Every structure is written in C-alpha cells, then in structure tokens.
Image: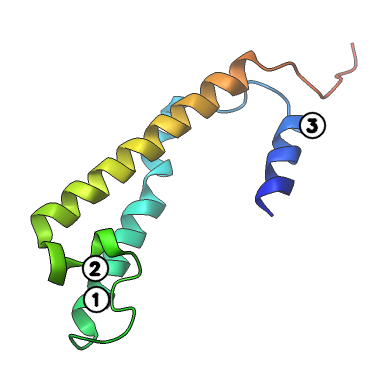
Amino acid sequence: VPVAAALDWLLLTPAGRLHLARRAAWLLYPLAYLAFTLARGELLLPGAQDRYLYPFLDVAQHGYKIVLGNALLVGLALYALAVLLVALDHIRPDPVRRPR
C-alpha cells in the first residue's frame, strides 16, 4: 500500500496540492498514537509481553522524561519529512494534463 500511495501521488495527483498550513493536522495521528501507547502500557500489568510496542517508548525502562524526549525526536523527524514532501510536491512536474 505505501508504494501504491507514492505512485498515486507521483503519477496521478496534480503537483502543488500539499501545503504547510495543514502541519498541525499531520501531527495529530502521531500524538494520538503516543497517547494510546502510553495509556496501553499503564493499563497492562508490569512484565506483560509487548507492554510497550516500541523499546524507546518503554516508560518502565526509561522513565517519562526520556520517553517524551524520544517521542519529541520522532515527531520532529516526521515533521521534517512532511516539510520535505511539501517541497518536493511544489518542485515536481505536474503529471496530470489539464485541458486548456
């Protein structure tokens, strides 16, 4: 599916449709996932297998300060990737031919 989405964006979507004005909405999913993961880890019993889905989010091992720092770094990386995709979207050729 990721390859199909990338091909759709490159070959079928008009260029210049992504904008940084939507940047806050892009980070809602990762924030919701972080909240879900931390809540899930708190609700499961200590020692449960896969209590935290990723080792860098394991509050029992690292503490909240380190885990939130890790989450911030991942969020910044996702934001940088989004900015890069917006820049690429604005410089790529338009694959969709519009009638004149």
Camera-side residue of 72 and 18:
72
Q: Which mark is residue 11?
A: 3
Q: Is residue 60 left or right of residue 20?
A: left
Q: Relative to 75, is 13 above or below?
A: above
Which residue ends up furthest to the top in the rendered image?
100
Residue wearing tag 1: 41
Quarter of the figure with residue 1: bottom right
Residue 59, x across and y down, in percent: 16, 67
Dot 1 amino acid type: Gly
Residue wearing tag 2: 38
Camera-side residue of 48 and 32:
48
Element type where label 2 sits in the image: helix
Q: Residue at 76% x, 19% y: name it.
A: 94
Answer yes or no: do the residues labelled 3 and 2 have beta carbons within 8 Å?
A: no
Answer yes or no: do the residues labelled 1 and 2 have beta carbons within 8 Å?
A: yes
Quarter of the figure with residue 63: bottom left
Q: Relative to 94, is 100 above or below?
A: above
Dot 2 amino acid type: Leu
Dot 3 amino acid type: Leu
Pair 3/1: label in front: 1
Camera-side residue of 72 and 17:
72
Mark positioned earlier in the residue sequence (3 or 2): 3
Element type where label 3 sits in the image: helix
Residue 6, x across and y down, in percent: 68, 40
Q: Residue at 32% x, 84% y: name it.
A: 49
Residue 34, x across and y down, in percent: 30, 60
